[in-house]
Image (cartoon, rainbow, N blue to C red):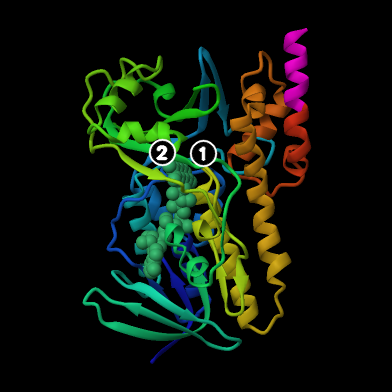
Amino acid sequence: MEKIDVLIIGAGPAGSVSSAYLNKLGYKTLVLEKTQFPRFVIGESLLPHCMDHLEEVGFLENVKKAGFQIKTGAAFYKGDKRVDFLFENQFTKGWTWTWQVKRAEFDTILINTAKEQGVPVKFRSEVTSVKCGPDKQIVTYMDEYEVEHTVEARFIIDASGYGRVLPRLFNLEEEVSTPARGAVFCHIHDTKRTGKQGENIFMHSFRNNKAWIWAIPFSDKTTSVGVVSDTEFVGEFAEDGGKKFLEHIRSFKDLNGRFAEEELVFQPREILGYAKRAKQLHGEGYVMCGNATEFLDPIFSSGVTLATGSGLLAAKLVHRQLTGEIIDWQTQYEDLMRKGVDVFRSFVLGWYNGDIQTIFFANAIEANIKEQVCSILAGYVWDENNPLVKKHKTIVPALAQVIRMNEVA
Ligand SMILES: Cc1cc2nc3c(=O)[nH]c(=O)nc-3n(C[C@H](O)[C@H](O)[C@H](O)COP(=O)(O)OP(=O)(O)OC[C@H]3O[C@@H](n4cnc5c(N)ncnc54)[C@H](O)[C@@H]3O)c2cc1C
């Protein structure tokens, strides 16, 4: 039986970052990935904070070479109102830009860079069972020829994303309290976009805060467009080979004209009921990171940044544990990760109950509040110097209430 130090399940952003970090420290790692890369996955708009993570593991230079679309901010629309958040106007001193990426290409660059650095990766290798104990973890996987293999590891990092390998195997999945939502999306040719306005991601709220549409332009003059809403509403758009979807996106003021004569790159795809949560993020001999832990909602593009951030933190703590330190996984990992996720949760809940939209589309939004919001939209959700991070649960509803009262008066 092959014996290694750390086995990583999944070669997405969380798996790439965590494996690269541990490999640099000399650990014997192995990444097992179910699919063959490049593979499609949704989640194309990054946040500036993920640049910190990519830089720390030495991925940034290779990603730069790919020439992805630069993202300097995000715009939100509601009816005729538009608000732009530019990352150069931030409370937290961090990265002021990032990229909008086709994930098939981006994820391949990340895992290939990890491979160049020495990380062994086995594609078409699906983890099927895991047994954890105090000193050794036994992992079984099936290769592309349906041959079963067993590996013994000192520690496991579950970075299996939507696969949620350990939450499923260890019965750790938990219901989420938010309504079941879904998304229908496609890539569309986008040859008529103009200037900076056409380059950054935008989100357009409609159906009285219940639905929104995204447009994420790529550098090859195609754009990702998707509609998010309750599962029944989005289901209709996936039914007629894209006709209704195209009609719908053409009905939006800012999209109309831009896509009037453009063709879809592929038929709309749907993903339903993606909001999931694991009851616990760690146990004897294992830790979960990225989407395997929880996925809330795509509105603020937080998924990849939470994946790279949690992957990096998990790897750092695994290293410390393997060198003999006693790690309190609850406080040093789970509570810390959940703290950042909870900031996004306040924003997500506030988006759908209207509080965040009241703040974003206020007649006048104070510059300091806008800067604090901007840092959250950039992914700096652990910066407790930011008052909006520290007191997100109370500030969001209170601020929305004040704005509503002022606008009525
Ligand atoms: C509609 C929608 C829109 C989104 N938009 C954005 C966005 O704009 N920006 C953003 O940052 N995020 C977005 N996301 C979230 C984003 O998709 C995820 O958060 C992100 O991909 C998580 O990365 P990860 O590394 O955790 O997992 P993944 O990228 O899912 O990678 C996990 C890997 O594990 C592999 N795997 C699974 N099971 C097994 C197994 N048994 N054995 C071996 N390997 C396995 C998978 O094949 C996969 O390659 C969106 C999500 C949705 C639903």
Q: Which residue was labeled with disc 2?
A: 183
* Vertical order, 311 against 226 (above or below): below
Along the viewing direction, whichever of 51 and 104 lies nearer the viewer? 104
Question: In which image quadrant can residue 315 be found?
Answer: bottom right
Range drawn in magenta: 399-409
Amino acid identity at mark 2: Ala
The quadrant where residue 141 appears: bottom left
Residue 218 visible in image = no
Disc 1 designates what residue?
97
Looking at this view, is 36 or 369 the one in front? Answer: 36
Disc 2 vs disc 1: Cβ atoms closer than 8 Å?
no
Give the residue drawn at x 60%, y 65%.
281
User: Label 2 vs label 1: CA separation?
Assistant: 26 Å
Q: Residue 220 at what x, y percent from top left?
A: 28, 36
- Tell whether 59 sits left or right of 404: left
Q: Secondary structure at mark 1?
A: loop
